[in-house]
Image (cartoon, rainbow, N blue to C red):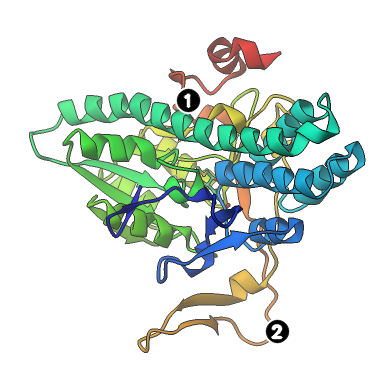
């Protein structure tokens, strides 16, 4: 997508520098900074520190990390080491394991001399594939938005609530939850997006930055406002992303998603989840019981980062000294609260039957 008129992906290969380039998202929405990632530790830090974040982007980054690892040492032992090292960065988004497993399976049968080249080619392929998956999710989600728009008086916006940032910077391009919005905007459909701030890290500010850059009307709201807006008939649908969806369609996403789903259910608001197939964990059924939830520590709760009037990006403490903070970073929305899953192949029920009919080749 475009930033100040220039087309960017959220990561790209710079042939001159012979290195991966990323957008350091810690500085957004205030500053647009890019950087090279050139060591295995640098890849792990980029994921842990959330310079790159969002499930699909974490997966693509890890694939490039494996490509770097193969340049350093293409042995079987080093594949296992890189797998473990990169996998230990963040526990919840399944795309990380998906990408590393895919790389490992492709590389192990190859001669050592061929592994570095093949790993880089595969990382490029995973990145390109992510773009196409998200584009298709957008086209499938567009139909839902068109249906709602068709029932409204001409020019009245379709009002969509979203949580966190499941936008183009959380993927390689397009985003998952935002892709239907970008496609609807391109199709000339009036939109208004309610953007949850998504404390503690305020990924909603990233979503606002994206939507604002693309001329999509939106309002940044507190995490607690969604239920009230739904009760008063101001939300036509909810679309969120997902970090891991189980084989029966339980959806793990940024903390607070579950409460939005409960409020949507109580108010008869359709609750859709944009789901790329690499985000399905076919090995897990009960998401509440079996998905590991990342704990990111108290400081993200007790402090907040922003830009002051002098233009400096700074961190301030919001709690009394010594206040303990609890920070589970994700929650699980049970499948019964999900109206449908918008995948690259179409929209299906959030159920084992729905997912395995959509992806018979993956379901096993
Ligand atoms: O902690 P984050 O910022 O990596 O969490 C991101 C989310 O929860 C997104 O909604 C999810 O990864 C879907 S991204 C297309």
Q: Between marks 2 and 1, how big is the CA–CA gap?
A: 45 Å
Q: Say which residue label 1 marks.
A: 343
At label 1, counting other C-alpha atoms closer than 10 Å, the crowd grade (few under 14, some 14-19, many 20 or more) is: many
Residue 256 shows up from this direction: yes
| Dot 2: element | loop
Q: Residue at x 83, y 41 (%)?
A: 74
Q: Say which residue label 2 marks.
A: 322
Looking at the picture, does residue 340 appear above or below residue 18? above
State whether label 2 is within 8 Å of ligand 1. no
State whether label 1 is within 8 Å of ligand 1. no
| Number of the label disc, if any, that sits on residue 61 | none
Expressed as whole percent of the image width and height from the top left, the position of residue 308 reads: 40, 84
Tell which circle, 2 or 1, labels the residue nearer the N-terminal end.
2
> Seen in the image, is 172 located left or right of residue 252?
left
Q: Quadrant of the C terminus?
A: top right
Q: Residue at x 58, y 15 (%)?
A: 359
| Dot 1: element | loop
Frontmost residue, 272 versus 268:
272
Q: Residue at x 35, y 54 (%)?
A: 210
Q: Residue at x 66, y 87 (%)?
A: 321
């Amino acid at each position: 997508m475009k930033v100040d008129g220039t087309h960017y992906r959220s990561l790209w290969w710079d042939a001159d520098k012979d290195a991966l380039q990323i957008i350091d998202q810690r500085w957004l929405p205030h500053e647009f900074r890019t950087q090279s990632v050139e060591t295995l530790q640098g890849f792990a830090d980029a994921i842990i520190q959330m310079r790159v974040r969002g499930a699909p982007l974490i997966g693509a980054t890890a694939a490039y990390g494996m490509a770097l690892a193969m340049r350093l040492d293409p042995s079987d032992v080093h594949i296992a080491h890189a797998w473990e090292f990169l996998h230990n960065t963040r526990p919840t988004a399944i795309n990380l394991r998906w990408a590393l497993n895919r790389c490992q399976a492709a590389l192990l049968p190859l001669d050592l001399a061929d592994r570095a080249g093949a790993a880089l080619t595969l990382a490029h392929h995973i990145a390109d594939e992510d773009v196409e998956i998200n584009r298709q999710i957008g086209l499938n989600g567009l139909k839902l938005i068109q249906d709602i728009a068709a029932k409204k008086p001409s020019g009245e916006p379709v009002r969509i609530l979203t949580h966190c940032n499941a936008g183009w910077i959380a993927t390689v391009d397009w985003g998952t939850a935002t892709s239907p919005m970008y496609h609807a905007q391109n199709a000339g459909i009036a939109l208004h997006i309610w953007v949850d701030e998504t404390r503690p890290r305020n990924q909603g500010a990233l979503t606002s930055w994206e939507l604002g850059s693309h001329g999509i009307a939106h309002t940044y709201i507190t995490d607690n406002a969604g239920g009230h807006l739904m009760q008063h008939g101001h939300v036509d649908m909810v679309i969120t992303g997902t970090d891991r969806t189980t084989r029966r369609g339980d959806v793990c996403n940024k903390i607070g998603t579950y409460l939005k789903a409960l409020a949507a259910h109580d108010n008869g608001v359709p609750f859709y989840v944009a789901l790329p197939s690499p985000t399905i964990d076919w090995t897990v059924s009960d998401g509440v019981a079996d998905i590991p939830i990342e704990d990111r520590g108290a400081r993200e709760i007790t402090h907040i980062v922003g830009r002051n009037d002098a233009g400096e990006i700074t961190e301030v403490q919001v709690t009394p000294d010594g206040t303990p903070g609890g920070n589970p970073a994700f929650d699980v929305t049970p499948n019964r609260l999900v109206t449908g899953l918008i995948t690259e192949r179409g929209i299906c029920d959030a159920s084992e039957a729905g997912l395995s009919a959509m992806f018979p080749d993956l379901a096993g």
